[in-house]
Image (spheres, grey):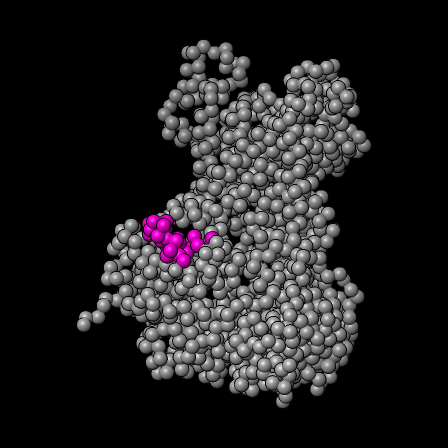
Amino acid sequence: MTRHVLRTVAQYGAVLVAAIALNFALPRLAPGDAIDYLLPPEQAGALTPEQRAEILDRFGLNDPLPEQFKDYVAGIARGDLLVSIRFGRPVTSLLGERVGWTLLLVGGALVLSTVIGALLGFRSAWRRGTSADTGTMAGMMFLDALPPFFVGMLLLLAFSVGLGWFPSYGALAPSDARGLESIGEVLKRAVLPIATLAIAGLGPMYLVARSALVSELAEDYVLMAEAKGLTDKEVRRHAARNALLPVSTVALVGLGTLVGGAAVVETVFSYPGLGRLIYESVLARDYPVIQGAFLLLIVTVVVANLLNDLVYPYLDPRVRRAHHE
Amino acid sequence: MTLADTDPARAADATPLGGGPPAQTPVPDRARRRGRRTGGVGRTLGVVGAVLVGACLAAALFAPVLSPYGPDETAGLPFLRPSSAHPLGTNDVGQDLFAQLLHGARLSLVIALGAALVAVVVGSAVALVAGYYRGPVETVLMRIVDLMLGFPFLVLVIVLAAFFGRGLGTTIFVIATVLWARPARILRSQVLKLREHAHVVAAKAMGASGLRVIGRHIVPRIAPLAAAQFVRAANVAVMLEASLAFLGLGDPDRVSWGTILYFANARSAFLTDAWQWWVLPPGLALTTVILGLAFVGSAVEEWADPRLRRSAARPARRRRGAVRVAGADDAPALSLAGLVVEYQLGRSVVRAVDGVDLEVERGRILGLVGESGSGKTTIALTAAGVLRPPGRVVAGDLSLGGRPVGRPSRPALAPYRGRDVALVPQAAMNALNPAYPVLRQVVEAARLTRDEAAAEVRSRQLLERVGLDPSRHQAFPHELSGGMRQRAVIAMALVNDPDLLVADEPASGLDVVTRAQVLKLLTELRDELRLGILLVSHDLPTVSRIADDLAVMYAGRIVERGPAAVVSASPRHPYTRALFGAFPSLKGERRPLAAVPGEVPDLSRTPEGCRFRTRCAEAVDGCATTDPALAGDGGHAVACIVQRPEERP
Amino acid sequence: MTPAPPVLELDAVSRRYRSRRGPRRQAEVVAVDGVSLTVQPAEIVAVVGESGAGKTTLARLILGLERPDTGAVRFDGRDLTSLRRSELRAVRQRMHLVFQDPYQSLHPGMRVGEIVAEPLAVRGDARAVRGAAVTRALEEVALQPAASMGRRFPHQLSGGQRQRVALARAMVARPELVIADEPTSMLDASVCAGILDLVLAMRDRHRTAFVYITHDLAVARWVSDRMVVMRNGQVVETGASDDVVHRPTADYTRLLLAASEGELDQVPS
């Protein structure tokens, strides 16, 4: 078992290294000078050639590439991800501020979409071929086809502007509400964004759950369970147990996609999360922030994949080895 | 150790157990092999999708014709409401929204289709290289693919767009970069499977070059799947492009649906009524294309992989549960009269079983023998109460150990399943749930008649009896060999002391020695438990050796029946004789084998006269018009007019 | 008269696999262990054994699709591993393969005529010559009329007919050796007889040697001149078929025979 763990970790480690290298290379590949990368455009434009050379030198950007790479990696190890051009603060602290909000949205949406999607998907699979199934399926496909930002806009229009139930932007109330009240405020502002993301993730989860259960129900052991005289509920439980495997994989791996959707949703709701940060930084050409956030995301995805690889044997006894011999 | 003690829990308590709706259906072998199509929900969806996408394509194509204005033209005053001149009104700078919608379609669709094409071509190339040549290249490529799939598409697109700028070509490139991974992964699995397909191995084995094998054998087989992936990729690409544009990262010079929404958001179209004609139309247009592509995608996927085809059959409707009644000790384990079972396949109805009577006495094995398409498996599933749609019992009268059940439908047999009739299916890998230990599954069955503690005791008892060492009782199914699994299934079937055991090819797929062991076990249990066994098989010589009675089936009917010793010694029906003659003898003389020319008749049409006539060497004129009934003397019955001279017309 | 050199010779061939399943199982699986056998021209040799005995690996080794870890596989006197890629391909054109699964062994998108012609195309025969050879091959396997049969697609044929096509494809280039890997195990008994007859006819008519792999002892004995019994990758017994069946020397052979005959008392529980 440990050998498998080590090998997986090594493989992902290799990918991480490749990602860091890519992160290093990208800005150096982009059109334009490194100066544009370090300073806001107004300042960069005002420099004389001598000043440019001096700055490049100071930041070690005239050093040979391997030297630069070494410094870069050392910097990452130290947690020093440069300074944001826009805010003038270390990137790490910026990321730290925003990550929490995005996690709230993505976490909430993941739980909701997984649970609801799986339940609906399983129900559809059991009632395969009936009008209930076809109806749900069509409905899900329709939901899935709605672009997330469109859904966000519609929800905003309906519940915020129209009904006035929820505030339309921000994550915290402008006032200094404390304790439970502040949690309430946070939740109120999180409802619509979470709902939007959850709706976006619902479709794929439903489809995976449905097809997973349908294929399990076609297996011989389900026939056997029926022949044994088990009740419908017990037969369903047999099949669902095995259908959970693909569902859990999709959930863990789909974390990445949800983060992507968060970028758009945070924009619609003016929510101060990571996704919005990336977007704003792209518009402002705040490269250090883009790089730092990109790296953070890669790490997250690698961790999610790793978790999935490690969790899977516990769910599927066929992959498990050594323990039961 | 024997199990002659009566099961004390076998009281005649009434336990209503309703029948349940099944989900998938085992289509009879012959139909499946012929690749018959069983209904197309996917096809309808595909047509609908094609219409939706087509409409959008048409709108894009004919944009200049449908609207007199250009997308960037100042067509009128700002914020005009919809009117005949401006069907969707104007935006905040007076541009005609309808024109923007139509022209926006062009950009959105061009980018989406272009990116999808690039992505699928790259993905296919990667899949072919990785899947065919394997080795370290494959591992590296696949890890990259795995990671790309987990990574948030949109974020990657945003970041790449930041570094590489905006513009039509760059956008296509950026989106394609993100999309190639999924087709690569899916097509590679397909290549891996195809690589081991016999015709590919055959081509390699006959000395064909790698290029020829890939080009002629593999590429054509993955083309349909690649087409499905193209549609799926286009679906995602539309969404990505729209999101990019919505964030203001799209091509700054051109209008797409996403940019319309970007401006709508930026100009706070919410605060006025304007959202109705500014936000809704492009959003709905996007939804329409995405949905249409999704529908077309499912249709293409179903066409590419016929196994995905959803059968149009509805699950059986729930009926109020039947009540279990008491049995009679001296009655036969199974008594079946006039059984007719049909399968609804698409538009045709196949009569798989057409009027079968049979009886299985307690303490005797009835061997039901036939080839594929004979109907024997259908009878087994019906008797066990697990026949699924599209199979349907049209007529029949069944008695189980003296209990009259009537027409053997699923609900009617539900109270007896697992208690008075038990099934041992084909020696398939998965008759046991791979996720639970063996003992747990046997105990689950035993709980039907006992409490938890007693169920465990009985289960262990039976598992040991069939030869499973106690140390293996908690093993998972995949940890046991095929033979041991099959024995565990037998134990599970017998745990509630049924009158009838239905064994459907219980030893197929097992090795010669294991097969003999399993069959030997069945004969021992028959004697110890006075069990009636309906043994269904295609292996005539083996069955005729261990069965007490033999019934030979052909095309849905029993053509010969009698004590096994009698029928083997002197088979009277031409088919039975041919069947015996088709198996070579192990030690006897090497005589020529009997080959039966021709094919089994099409059971979607009731044949005229004798069903075996077209393949029979002894047919006479009368065979074409008379449908012979089973009749005979001394327990040996035959359905053939040639063999019973007194009935020849 | 000196005897002709054997068509095929396996000389103490071994092949081991590393078990790929699971993280801890790095144990080696010995698929084929020190197997020697020879096949003379126009001889039918049956290889019998249960699943896992190494029969399929043996087939792959003979075809050169895998290399043995030790020992040599010689076709017409030449060691397969000593051949260059182009020479190996040329050798492969002189031996063919018939598979177990009639539903998978034919390319579903190719017509029967093209399928049967493929070995000739690979060999480089001119198109004009191929047509006549294909017609002859189809007639030999009793798939008539050859012209209309040739235009059909595999899914329009029954299992037995597909195996006949596979046989026609195997024979069309007049190979010296055909490996038949359980060609009848997925067919109904009434159809199987026809295939077995064809195998014998081909040996008689074209002097083709066969390696006939099967788990069914009765079929093995009926169709072959000599038999090789395998267990766990090793050869347990070999000899003329009738001798092996009537006078087995190995215990395992006796066990197999007893099980095949349904003599259940001799089979342990």
- How many marks on residues? 0
Quarter residue B325 falls in: bottom right
Where residue A14 sits in the image (x, y, percent)? Answer: 43, 41
The single residue placed furthest to the right in the displayed view is A163
The secondary structure making up most of the magenta span is helix
Where residue C11 sits in the image (x, y, percent)? Answer: 27, 66
Q: Quadrant of the C terminus of chain B?
A: bottom right
Left or right, A109 with reference to B587: right
Residue found 56% across the figure and 33% down from its top:
B113
What range of the chain is rendered magenta?
C111-135
Q: Quadrant of the N terminus of chain B?
A: bottom right
Where residue C106 sits in the image (x, y, percent)? Answer: 46, 56
Residue found 41% across the figure and 58% down from its top:
C135
Quarter residue C116 falls in: bottom left
Left or right, B194 with reference to C92: right
Residue found 61% across the figure and 84% down from its top:
B644
Left or right, B417 with reference to A296: right
Above or below, comparing residue C268 to residue A269 in the picture: below
Above or below, comparing residue C38 to residue B7 in the picture: above
Residue found 37% across the figure and 61% down from its top:
C171
Where residue A320 sits in the image (x, y, percent)? Answer: 51, 58
- Would residue A110 be counted in the magenta stretch? no
Residue A89 shows in this picture: no
The single residue placed furthest to the left in the displayed view is C1
Residue B219 shows in this picture: yes
**Residue nearest the observer in this picture, B607 or A314:** B607
- Would residue C124 be counted in the magenta stretch? yes
